[in-house]
Image (tube, grey):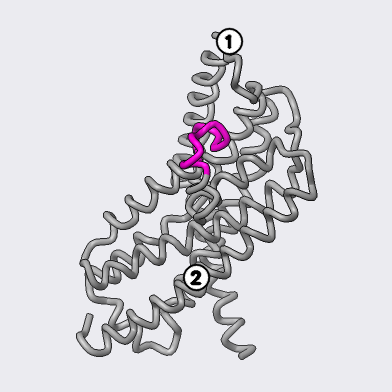
Amino acid sequence: MGATLRLYAALAGFSFRNHLGSWRYIMSRLGAYIFFTIIIGEFWRAIIAQGTRHFPFGIDDIIWYCGVGQLIVFASPRIFMRIEDDVLSGNIAYHLTRPVDYLELRLAEGVGGLAANLLLFMPLGFALCYFYTGAMPRGSIGYTALFIIFASLLHMMFQILAGFSGVWIHEVQMPYRIYQKFMLMLGGLEVPVSVYPAVMQYLAWATPLGLLLMLPCTAIFTPDTGQQAREAILMFGWVGVIFALMLMLYGRVRKYISLNGG
């Protein structure tokens, strides 16, 4: 057990260092993050300047909200593309016969890459929002960071689910894009879910696709730490549920490939 843990720690560490060393990738993602955060912020600044009688948020809240949402989207490593290569090339069948478990291998790589990205993106993202607005958020930075970590883990596991679905449908981009669009829509990436119609708000709260973005984004202007603690428990529960679902699907993948080949 100890040797196995050291192996996966080494794999995660290698992925961590590899991501930190990929400066072209980092700068392109960071540049896109800054661009979209400022563009959406200015879009909302123009709308709020026109006068919105029933809109409950100020421009500072909205900029912090959008900055947190964009951070989750851009800081996440695109692990589904690694799985897509293995599935479509048939190499996944070869990987499944190796001593290193395939799912644990990809999880170790994903966690290492995610840790590197968050180490860079979280402080830079918070700094951008602070200097852009000139104000600290009303909510807790600590709880927001915790929600971002939970959300990023959920996003990574959904990517793995999309990747494994390619074993049956021979397509990974399509299920990932479908998931991505529902996640962005229900999570309220650019518009707070609280201004959605009632049915959409219910769907956002009832599914992890909505909570993945909604809870980190709203935590930034929610001063009630008790509410944030309850929501953190809710998100942690969804992490456990999706992790169990991922293990079940992985078992089906192994069984399917052992019977039908890669």
- Left or right: where does residue 70 sit relative to residue 224? left
- Residue 253 lies, in percent from the top left, at 33, 79
| Tag in front: 1 or 2 | 1
Magenta segment range? 188-201
| Residue at image point 35% right, 84% down | 96
- Left or right: where does residue 254 sit relative to residue 203? left
Q: Nearer the viewer, residue 30 or 143?
A: 143
- Residue 134 lies, in percent from the top left, at 72, 22
N-terminal-most mark, 1 or 2: 1
Give the residue type at disc 2.
Leu
**Outermost top residue:** 50
The residue beneath circle 2 is: 107
- What numbered label is drawn on residue 51? 1
Q: Is residue 240 magenta?
A: no
Q: Nearer the viewer, residue 236 or 125?
A: 236
| Secondary structure under the numbered disc 2 in the rendered image | helix
The answer to whether 7 is drawn above or below residue 160 in the figure is below
Q: Nearer the viewer, residue 160 or 75?
A: 160
Quadrant the N terminus occupies: bottom right
| Residue at image point 61% right, 41% down | 217
- Residue 150 lies, in percent from the top left, at 61, 58
- Tell me if mark 2 has few (under 14), some (14-19) or many (20+) residues whose alpha carbon lies within 10 angstroms of its own: many
- Residue 255 lies, in percent from the top left, at 31, 87
Q: Nearer the viewer, residue 65 or 39?
A: 65
- Left or right: where does residue 165 sit relative to residue 99? left
Quadrant the C terminus occupies: bottom left
- What numbered label is drawn on residue 89? none
| Secondary structure under the numbered disc 1 in the rendered image | loop
| Residue at image point 33% right, 50% down | 177
- Tell me if mark 1 has few (under 14), some (14-19) or many (20+) residues whose alpha carbon lies within 10 angstroms of its own: few
Q: Quadrant of residue 92?
A: bottom left
Q: Is residue 195 magenta?
A: yes
